[in-house]
Image (cartoon, rainbow, N blue to C red):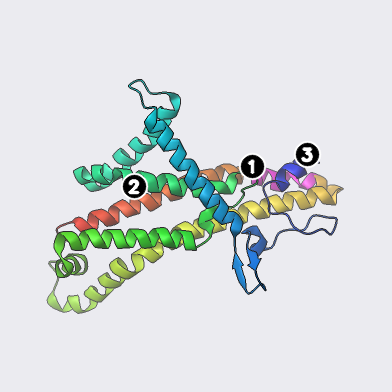
Amino acid sequence: MALSAAMAALLPMQGDTGGFQPPTVTESFFYDAVGNGSVIASWKVVGLLVIGTAAILVFFLATARRAAVVPSKVQFFAEGIYGFVRNGIAIEVMGRAGRGWAPFLSTMFVFILVMNIYEIIPVAAVPVTSHFVFPAALAAMVWVLYNFVGIKKHGLLGYLKATCVIPGIPLPMHILLIPMEFLSKILLQPFTLAVRLFANMFAGHMLVVVAGAGTIYLLESGGLNYAMAVLPALASVGLWFFELLICSLQAYVFVLLTAIYLEAAMADSH
């Protein structure tokens, strides 16, 4: 049962009933009861967060310390990530001002990518960003940042005018559109930013768990089910590559939207 053991390494396993017990939704995201069980936490996810953050810091500090005119493969890889975000997102969206934001956006991209990619790493097997608190914290940081730079450049009233007032429309339309613009640009943007990342990673993780659990269940059942296990096993392999793409894409989209919000906050007009 080598395949069964390999699939099991990708899933949260529980129970001691002698057979495979498919993980519940709660167990799939590693919630752990605290005290009398009225409070839940996820110590594994917190541990993955700490390990991932430390790994990112060590990697880039070590790369910068050993930087050379002729880059090593590791330096080339690190510079490639930074160059991709700087040229493909920061400067592309924000123009010359994007150069100053490139380090922040690159850091955010790598952080989100690492937290996402835990999903397809055996033993880890859960994306940190599938816990809503982490995308929410990132979105809150972005919200504070783009509002701060907008107010710093335009002043509070000037920023609200540039953000919420659409020039060139009939005066009565402002009664309808100003509240809508305020709601969408000031209040809902960070919420949608967080939900987009969370929902994609949550749903993707559930698909991986379902395909893996189905494979193990059929392998453990034997008989005809043993042959049928090929289908979810192939689906698991396909989902692994698909989720690798999604992990990268969601990191890119989050950072791209952050750059767009920052550029819009500093723009001179709506």
Query: Looking at the picture, does residue 265 appear above or below residue 169?
Result: above
- Residue 83 visible to the viewer: yes
Mark 1 is on which residue type? Val
Residue bounds of the magenta highlight: 227-237
Identify which residue, 214 or 162, lies in the foreground: 162
Instruction: Give how far across and how far down residue 179 sits, in percent.
Output: 25, 76
Identify which residue, 41 or 210, lies in the foreground: 41
Residue located at (82% from left, 50% from top): 220
Position of 225 compared to 29: left or right? right
Q: Is residue 6 magenta?
A: no
- Check residue 237 in the rendering and tell me which mark sits there, or answer none: 1
Identify which residue, 259 or 215, lies in the foreground: 259
Residue located at (43% from left, 33% from top): 62
Query: Looking at the picture, does residue 113 appear above or below residue 43?
Result: above
Q: Indicate which label's residue lies in the foreground, 1 or 2.
A: 2
Determine which quarter of the picture holds residue 191: bottom left
Marks 3 and 2, how far apart in space? Answer: 42 Å
Task: Decide: few, some or many residues near mark 2? Use Cα within 10 Å; few <14, some 14-19, many ≥20.
Answer: many
Q: Tell me the element at label 3.
A: helix
